[in-house]
């Protein structure tokens, strides 16, 4: 790519592709310059340093959380849509959970936008600002943990997931069944692949039901 045709968007999209295919550590200024066929100095017109690049990459992934938000829908439906999108983005880009703690959040516009939107929805539900900030943090951590603890491991192919389940089953079967009867019963379920759609649907329901149950204005909300 000719330096004069290089854009910030092109840099971010190539960084996204590189992170998706090779992992977050592969995303460096020098590697991106090689991928784009320009000198590293050409990238500094669009991102000042690696920190800004990573913040821009996080923003690229978080922008979907508030895209096409319908302001006429009940607060809990809008919140569910945001949490669902966050889970979907983390599933598609598992390094997002590693990326978020790394970025300079003061330079991440979409991070602020998503956080502000969630806090607004939660105050609409009757939480105080302090409570809303705490709940937003719980939801973020819950969504990320849901993906990182996915049955069979994140990013595994079918064969790797089957091997992961086999080892897990064998570990549980070594336990004394008289002392751990429920773990022994659970081990038998590991012979078949888990229903990941059901896993994520249940996890999102669990997170949102806790918010709806404790929300001061949450009684009688429509799903």
Image: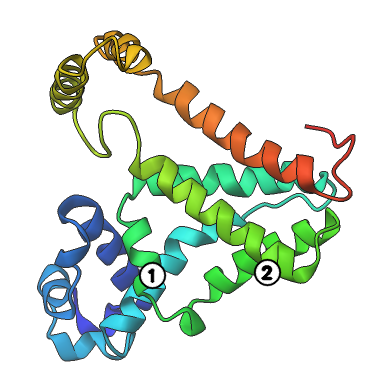
Crowding at mark 1 (Cα within 10 Å: few <14, some 14-19, many 20+) = few
First-in-chain label (2 vs 1): 1
Residue 17 in the image, given as x and y percentages of width and height: 25, 56
Q: Nearer the viewer, residue 84 or 172?
A: 172
Residue 83 in the image, given as x and y percentages of width and height: 58, 47
Vertical order, 32 against 21 (above or below) = below
At 59% from the left and 73% from the top, the residue drawn is: 112
At 21% from the left and 14% from the top, the residue drawn is: 176
Residue 159 in the image, given as x and y percentages of width and height: 13, 22
The image's mark for residue 116 is: 2
> In the rendered view, how is the structure colored?
rainbow
Vertical order, 153 against 110 (above or below) = above
Image-quadrant location for residue 213: top right
Vertical order, 154 against 216 (above or below) = above
Q: Is residue 78 left or right of residue 139?
A: right
At 77% from the left and 32% from the top, the residue drawn is: 223
Choose mark 2 or mark 1, whichever is in front. 1
Residue identifier under label 1: 101
Q: Nearer the viewer, residue 158 or 128?
A: 128
Question: Which element carries disc 2, helix, strand or loop?
Answer: helix
Q: Is residue 199 left or right of residue 77?
A: left
């Amino acid at each position: 790519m000719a330096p004069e045709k290089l854009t910030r968007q092109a840099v971010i999209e190539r960084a996204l592709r590189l992170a998706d295919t090779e992992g977050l550590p592969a995303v460096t200024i020098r590697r991106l310059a090689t991928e784009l066929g320009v000198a590293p100095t050409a990238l500094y017109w669009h991102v000042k340093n690696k920190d800004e690049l990573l913040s821009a990459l996080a923003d690229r992934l978080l922008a979907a959380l508030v895209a096409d938000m319908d302001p006429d829908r009940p607060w809990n439906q809008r919140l569910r849509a945001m949490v669902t999108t966050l889970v979907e983005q983390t599933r598609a880009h598992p390094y997002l959970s590693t990326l978020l703690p790394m970025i300079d959040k003061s330079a991440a516009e979409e991070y602020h936008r998503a956080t502000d939107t969630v806090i607004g929805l939660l105050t609409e539900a009757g939480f105080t600002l302090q409570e809303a900030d705490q709940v937003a943090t719980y939801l973020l951590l819950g969504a990320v943990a849901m993906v990182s603890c996915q049955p069979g491991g994140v990013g595994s192919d079918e064969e790797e997931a089957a091997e992961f389940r086999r080892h897990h089953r064998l570990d549980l079967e070594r336990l004394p069944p008289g002392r751990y009867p429920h773990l022994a019963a659970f081990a038998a379920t590991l012979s078949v692949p888990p229903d990941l759609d059901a896993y994520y649907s249940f996890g999102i329901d669990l997170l949102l039901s806790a918010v709806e149950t404790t929300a001061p204005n949450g009684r009688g909300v429509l799903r």
